[in-house]
Image (tube, grey):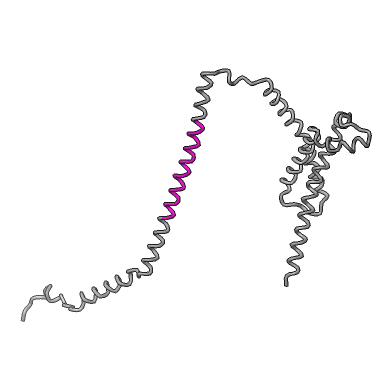
Amino acid sequence: MSTKGPTQDDNVTDFPGRDKGDTEENHQSTVEAAPSAAEIERRNRLYELDRKEYQAREALRKKSFMDRLTIVSAVGFVFTVFYFLSLQNPEIYSIDKDTLKTINQAINALVLLTVPFVLGAIGAAARILISDITPEHKGGLIVSSGLMGVFSWISIKSGVLVALLAPHLEKANLTPDNVTSSQSDFYTLALVAIAVGMFSTNVYLMISQRVEQLTLQSKTAKP
């Protein structure tokens, strides 16, 4: 009888199908993990779309950069030309008396026309307050009505409106000079600005209300 214990060779058991089974499992998992042809095509399409989108963004960025560069270059060129001209001809910046007079009139007119703008805006706001409906763009409507009041003052101050009303003024034994230079000139112009502002807002409100009525009727008429 042998007294030797089990050796290392005795503990090793051969499994002939072991390596083969592991290989088949690995192959099966590899087959399952491999994408299909449709998936590969979809990924290629997505990659192509991303690439085209990136190229379009880059082209747009380059175009914007070139546009800005062109504008900056043009402005720099103009300033450079004016700089050299001013060095050679310092008198080019001397403003003529007629130009100064025109600028003065423009500034005075801008300050003066602030009054009819405010009055026309007040008339428009008053018309909106007494209206049954509230317009969506209320601020823009008030500003535009104020501008209409400004236009009315310009037409009166320029004499165009008075020239159009000259036949009616002659019937009333009034001259255009008396109308535009009387003591009540300011109050007349103020009343005209307020009336024009209210009239402009009233026209907008009437049209808006009519459109809402027609829209409601069309919706009600549908089965």
The quadrant of the rendering that contains the C terminus is: bottom right
Based on the picture, tell me whether residue 74 belongs to the magenta stretch: yes
Residue located 27% across and 74% down the image: 25
Looking at the image, which residue is at 77% across and 54% down? 207
Left or right of 93 in this view: 3? left
Residue farthest to the bottom?
A: 1
Quarter assignment of residue 27: bottom left
Residue 63: within the magenta? Answer: yes
Indicate left or right for 68 with 118 as reference. Answer: left
Q: Quadrant of the N terminus?
A: bottom left
The image quarter containing residue 179 is top right
Percent x, y of residue 90: 56, 18
Image coords of residue 50 (percent x, y)? 42, 57
Residue 163 in percent (x, y) is at 83, 35
Looking at the image, which residue is at 74% across and 46% down? Answer: 141
Residue 91 location in percent, x, y? Answer: 58, 18
Q: Residue shown at 83%/42% (left/top)?
A: 195
Residue closer to the observer: 7 or 139: 139
Q: Based on the displayed image, in which of its 4 quarters is residue 51 positioned?
A: bottom left
Residue 193 vertical position relative to residue 204 in the rendered view, above or below: above
Task: Give the main secondary structure, helix, strand or loop, of the magenta stretch.
Answer: helix
Q: Report the residue that reaches farthest toward the front.
A: 167
Determine whether, in the image, residue 197 is placed left or right of residue 28.
right
Q: Is residue 44 above or below residue 24?
A: above
Question: How many numbered markers are drawn?
Answer: 0
Magenta stretch bounds: 52-76
Position of 176 relative to 22 (above/below): above
